[in-house]
Amino acid sequence: MVGMLLTEIDHVAIAVRDLEAAIDYYNRAFGATVEHREIVEQDGVEEALLKVAESYVQLLTPTRDDSPVAKAIEKRGEGLHHIGYRVDDCAAALASMIAAGATPIDKAPRPGSRGTTVAFIHPKGSFGTLIELVQE
Ligand code: CO
């Protein structure tokens, strides 16, 4: 067993078809406002981050038809897409997950949104949850 590597829930990512509608809904329902917005070309997504204490709700929409988020919405509809776990050292956490039997999507940490370093883990082998390791 390793020492605890998770420092925070970084974000809960929700895949939506209409980003403006989702932002408006979260604003009307919770008074939540967008703290950060970004298009991540590599992943084919646009995201809006709504801050909740030290974490975020991440509303995520595809920017092109072949993006993984577009495929996820096509297959399963809108909804919970992945969970981002915040760690101090993405490479160390990725190695620890692989040692524990996880199937990595990213073999090495790579740049994420808002200047973070991230790595994705396949839901298969992780009890059905797409996991993103996030180092700020
Ligand atoms: Co994410």
Image (tube, grey):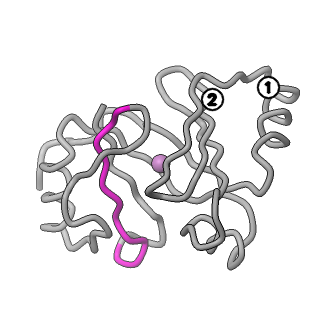
Residue at image coords 28%, 42%:
117
Residue at image coords 11%, 50%:
2
CA distance for labels 1 and 2: 10 Å
Q: Which of the marked residues, 1 or 2, is nearer the chain's N terminus?
A: 1
Quarter occupied by residue 47: top right
Q: Toward the viewer: 107 or 76?
A: 107
The vertical placement of 107 against 20, above or below, is below
Residue at image coords 71%, 22%:
33
The answer as to whether callout 2 falls within 8 Å of ligand 1 is no
Percent across and percent down for residue 134 are: 33, 42
Label 2 Cα neighbours within 10 Å, binned few <14 / some 14-19 / many ≥20 = many
Quarter occupied by residue 26: top right
Percent across and percent down for residue 58 are: 59, 41
The vertical placement of 45 against 34, above or below, is below
Secondary structure type for disc 2? strand
* Magenta residue span: 115-125
Residue identifier under label 1: 30
The vertical placement of 98 against 47, above or below, is below
Judge from the rendering whether residue 102 lies leftward or rightward of residue 54; answer left or right. left
Percent across and percent down for residue 75 are: 68, 79
Type of amino acid under label 1 = Phe
Type of amino acid under label 2 = Leu
Residue identifier under label 2: 50
